[in-house]
Amino acid sequence: MPIEHAVPAFAIIGAVNHGKSSILSTLMEDDAVAVSSMPGVTVHAKRFALRDLVVFHDTPGFQNARKALAEINRAPADANDPLAKFRVFVEQHQTDPQFEAECRLLKPVLAGAGIIYVVDGSLAPTPLNECEMELARLTGVTRLAIVNRTGEQDYIGQWRAALNRSFNAVREFNAHSASFEDRKDLLETLANINRDWKPYLLKAVTALQEDRSARIDDAAALAVSLVCDCLTFSARLSLKIDSAEARTAADLALQERFKTQLAKIESSAHNKMIALFAHHLVQSSSESASLFKDGLFSVETWRLMGLNAKQLTMTGAAIGAVAGAGTDALTLGHTLLLGTAVGAAIGGTTAYLVGKKQPSVSVKTPRFSKALQLLMPEKLQLSAQEMVVGPMQANNFPWILLDRALCSLNYVAGRAHGRRDETAIQMDQLLPSLQQKKLSVEYWSDEDRKRCEKLFAKLRLSKTLVGNESQELKDIIARHFGEVVASADRATH
Ligand SMILES: Nc1nc2c(ncn2[C@@H]2O[C@H](COP(=O)(O)OP(=O)(O)O)[C@@H](O)[C@H]2O)c(=O)[nH]1
Ligand SMILES: [Mg+2]
C-alpha cells in the first residue's frame, strides 16, 4: 500500500486543455487559478488547500503519456508497492525534457496524493487517453475521474465505459456551471472512496456549509446597512442663488447628485456582496450603467421591482400615520383608494409615493422661513439658501433595493468560479427568474412585509434603527437571502 498523507491530497491530472484548472477553480471558489485556452498555461504544479482538510495539486497534465506508459511498464515491479515502477521512472527521467510534465504530475502522487483525472466529455476518447487512464490505474492510488463537457458534443457514454474500468468513481462536473451542491457532492464522493480520508473530507463538506451560512448572514448585514443608508440619505447644497435660472440649474444638479450618490451607495454594497462570494470578475451594474437606463433609477426598475401595486397601497395605509414628510399624501392616497380599483386610481403624487412610479425628488430650502428671510439683510438672505433633496420617500424604494440585492445575490451564489468572462450584473434581466421561483420581495409573507414596513417607517422617522430593530430586519432578510442562495445552490445549469 502507498503511504498516504494524513491530510487527503489529490493531483489533478489529464490531457492539456480538458479543464483541469477550471474544475479546481470552481471547486475551490478561486477565480484566480490560471486557466487558458492556450495549451500549457499551467506549467508548474500548484497547491491549493481547503482549510487544512484537503489539498489539491493543479498539474500541467500529460505531455508524452504513451512513451511514459511504455517506460513504466518496463521498470521492475514490486508486488507490494504499485508505485515502485513510478518511483524508478521519475528517478530516471527527472531531467529528461520529454517527460517533464509526467515527472511533475507524479511528484504529489509519489508523496501520497490520490488522483483526480479530468476529461473533456465533448471530445471522444482517444488511444492516447487510454494510455493516461492506464497510467492512473497502475498507480493503485485512490482515483476519481471527472467528466467536464466544454463543448456541445456529448461523448459521456463512451467515456464512462472506459473510465469505469480504471477509476474508483466517475462523476460529471461542469467547471462553468457546477453549483455549490455539485461541489459538496464531489467532496462526498471523494470521502466515500477512501476510508482513511473520509473524516477529513466530511469535515471539509461541513466547513463549506458553515462558510455558506456565514456568507448569507454577512450579506444580510450588508443589505441592512444599504437600506439604512439609502432611506436616510439626503443631498445638501449651500450656495448663493441670484436668479431664477441659477435656482433651476442648481435644483437639477442637486437632484442628479442625490440619485448618483444613492446609486453609488448601492453599488458599493453590491460590490461588497460580490467580494463576499469571492468573485473578482464580476461587478455591480449600477457602477457601469447609466443611472436612467438600467440602474437604480430607471423607469423599468421602478415599474418591475419591489412590491406590487396592491401591496404598496396596503403599505401606504399601514404606515401613513408615521411616514413623516409623506404623511399627507399617503393618508390621502389611502382614503381615495379605498374600495376603488387600485391600478386605475393611482395617479399624481400619490402614485409616486405609494405606487410603482419613481417620484420626482423636490428640492427644499428648509433653513429659514420666507417671512424670516425677508426680515434679514439682503446679504444674509442670499447666503441662507441651503437646498436639500431627500431622503427618498417612495414606499417602494426599500423594496426595490431589496429586490436588486436579491438579484445580485442569486447571481453570485450561482456563478461558478471556473468561468473567466468579466461581467456586470444586469439586475433587471435576473428578476424574472427570481419572480418565477417566487423569491422576489413581492412573495414575502404579509407578516414579514409588515414587520419590515414598520422598521422602514421607524428608520425614516428617527434616521436610525436601534440594535434589536436592525437585528430583526437582518433576521428577516437573512431568511429570504438563505432561500435565494439555497435555490442557486441546488440549480443544475
Ligand atoms: N464552455 C466551457 N469551457 C470550459 C469548461 N472548462 C474549461 N473550459 C475552457 O477550456 C479551456 C481550458 O481550460 P483549463 O482549465 O485551462 O484546462 P487545463 O489545461 O486542463 O487546465 C479554457 O479556455 C476554459 O475556459 C467548461 O466547463 N465549459
Ligand atoms: Mg491548467
Image (cartoon, rainbow, N blue to C red):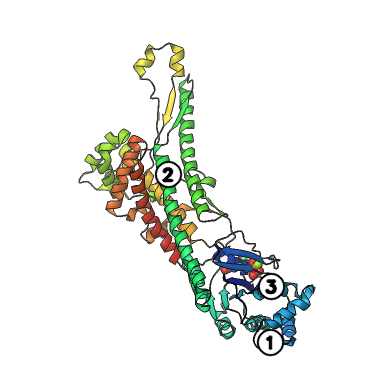
Q: Which of label 1 and label 2 is nearer to you?
A: 1
Q: Would residue 99 be found to the left or right of residue 286 on screen? A: right
Q: Which of label 2 and label 3 is nearer to you?
A: 3
Q: Would residue 41 be found to the left or right of residue 392 on screen? A: right
Task: Please state the horizontal and vertical placement of residue 479, each as a whole percent of the image.
Answer: 36, 56
Q: Which of label 1 and label 3 is nearer to you?
A: 1
Q: Is residue 332 above or below residue 153?
A: above
Residue at (22, 40) in percent of width and height: 335
Residue at (64, 73) in percent of width and height: 13
Between 150 and 144, the residue placed more toward the observer is 144
Q: Is mark 3 within 8 Å of ligand 2?
A: no
Task: Please state the horizontal and vertical placement of residue 152, each as a whole percent of the image.
Answer: 57, 73
Task: Please state the horizontal and vertical placement of residue 243, each as a whole percent of the image.
Answer: 47, 20
Which badge, 2 or 3, is on the more N-terminal residue? 3
Kind of residue indicated by mark 3? Lys
Kind of residue indicated by mark 2? Ser
Between 486 and 303, the residue placed more toward the observer is 486
Between 135 and 356, the residue placed more toward the observer is 135
Residue at the spot of label 1: 78
Between 239 and 201, the residue placed more toward the observer is 201
The label number, if any, that marks residue 225 in the structure image = 2
Q: Distance from label 1 to label 3 (Cα)?
A: 19 Å
Badge 2 element: helix
Residue at the spot of label 3: 107
Q: Is residue 287 above or below residue 196?
A: above
Task: Please state the horizontal and vertical placement of residue 46, each as a whole percent of the image.
Answer: 65, 65
Q: Distance from label 1 to label 2 (Cα)?
A: 65 Å
Displayed quadrant of residue 3: bottom right
Which badge, 1 or 3, is on the more N-terminal residue? 1
Quadrant field for ligand 2: bottom right
Contact? badges 1 and 2 (CB < 8 Å): no
Badge 3 element: helix
